[in-house]
Image (cartoon, grey):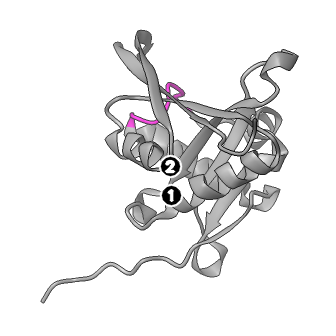
Amino acid sequence: MTATTATPQVRIAALRPEHAEQVLKIYQLGIDEGNATFETAAPTWAEFDAAKLPEHRLVALGDGGRVLGWTAVAPVSERRAYAGVVEHSVYVHPGARGHGVGAALLDALLASTDAAGVWTVQSGIFPENTASLALHRRAGFRVIGTRERVSRHHGRWRDVVLLERRSPTVH
């Protein structure tokens, strides 16, 4: 007899302050795995809230309102020429991976940024994070290059694959 894993029911909603504790826990779980970010600790809610654009913050909610994952964007520059360029993050709780949560979040985020006139969504991903790279390729991102040995992370140099997705609706 084989065990089956139930696919969680997912509802995408705006990320609100009441989700903060669960969002930051998922962020820290990603950090602890070692292939999500150069950060070594999740920010405080105040730091997160100040850094992320409020109109493009989403959560994937499961049964009972449990946060399964989140996505958010930050501006890449204060310069007016880059007003339509953002850098995004997407994190999925380890127990919810492999069930389409990341794809649902990324699809909803791209619909939100397209509707707002954002013309480029970009990200930097460690090459070892093959699941995230595959997710982004499926969502229409393309690799634009690799920054080699861009920074030290836990005592070793790390590369970062740069990806971008140009909006098909913003001209």
Q: Residue at x 63, y 80 (%)?
A: 64
- Count of numbered tags: 2
- Residue sitting nearer the eye, 23 or 90: 90
Q: Quadrant of the C terminus?
A: top right
Q: Looking at the magenta stretch, what is its main secondary structure?
A: loop
- Residue sitting nearer the eye, 78 or 85: 85
Among numbered discs 2 and 1, the one appearing first in the sequence: 1
Q: Residue at x 54, y 27 (%)?
A: 39
* Residues tagged 2 and 1 counted as in contact (Cβ below 8 A): yes
* Circle 1 residues within 10 Å: few <14, some 14–19, many ≥20: some
SS state under label 1: helix
Rounded to the nearest angstrom, the CA distance separating label 2 from label 1 is: 7 Å
The amino acid sitting under disc 2 is: Ala
x and y percentages locating residue 155 in the rendered image: 36, 14
Q: Is residue 137 above or below residue 37?
A: below
Say which quarter of the image contains residue 63: bottom right
The amino acid sitting under disc 1 is: Ala
Q: Residue at x 75, y 57 (%)?
A: 15
Residue identifier under label 2: 139
- Mark drawn on residue 74: none
SS state under label 2: loop
- Magenta region: which residues? 34-41
Q: Quadrant of the N terminus?
A: bottom left
- Residue sitting nearer the eye, 84 or 74: 84
x and y percentages locating residue 122 in the rendered image: 60, 31
x and y percentages locating residue 157 in the rendered image: 36, 12
Q: Residue furthest right?
A: 80
- Mark drawn on residue 103: 1
Left or right for 100, reference 71? left
